[in-house]
Amino acid sequence: QVQLVESGGGLVQAGGSLRLSCVASRRTFTSYAMGWFRQAPGEEREFVGAISSGGSNTHYADSVKGRFTISRDSAKNTVFLQMNSLKPEDTAVYYCAAARSYSYSYISVNSAGYDYWGQGTQVTVSS
């Protein structure tokens, strides 16, 4: 069992930045690919970005490419989502998720590929 706790959400003006953090409970954090998803009211949960267990492979949704960056600190069992140039359409609850991986380069863009989820953190971008 892996517990994930997100933090760093909040209210920010359009054009601003936020950094989300997700701390994992297990020491085997390096065995998991990590992903970020978001869900706006009345919308489906959507993929934002992911990073492989080894940290060398990342992938982003087109809507955030060039603005968001995922990184991980294995020593702290933490994955980060740096969000710059935020837009009102980025407003959502953001979730981190962990996927068991057997390859250092494995990532998944589908929510079904993830085994554990955090409780979410609200990000609100005002215009």
Image (cartoon, helix red, strand yellow):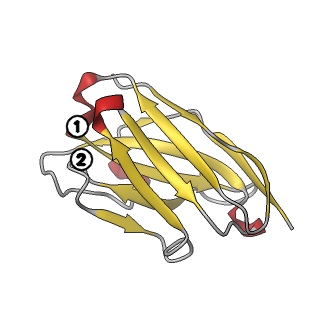
The answer to which image quadrant residue 77 occupies is: top left
Answer above or below: position of 60 versus 20: below
User: If the image is split into quadrants, where does the N terminus sit?
Assistant: top left
110 and 95: which one is in front? 95
Q: Which mark is residue 15?
A: none
Q: What SS does tag 1 mark?
A: helix
Secondary element under disc 2, as helix, strand or loop, is loop
Left of 31 or right of it: where is 67? Answer: right
- Residue type at mark 1? Thr
Residue at 45 percent across and 31 percent down: it is: 23
Residue tagged 1: 30
Amino acid found under the numbered disc labelled 2: Ser
Q: Please give left or right for residue 81 compared with residue 54 in the image.
A: right
The percent position of residue 120, horizontal first and vertical second, equals 60, 38
Residue 33 placement, left or right of 127: left
Q: Are marks 2 and 1 in contact (CB under 8 Å)?
A: yes
Residue 95, position in %: x, y?
55, 44
Question: Which label is found at residue 53?
Answer: 2
| Spatial CA span between label 2 and label 1 | 5 Å
Tag 2: Cα neighbours inside 10 Å, few (<14), some, or many (≥20)?
many
Which quarter of the figure is the C terminus placed in?
Answer: bottom right
Residue drawn where x is 36% and y is 26% of the image: 2
> What is the tally of numbered marks visible in this picture?
2
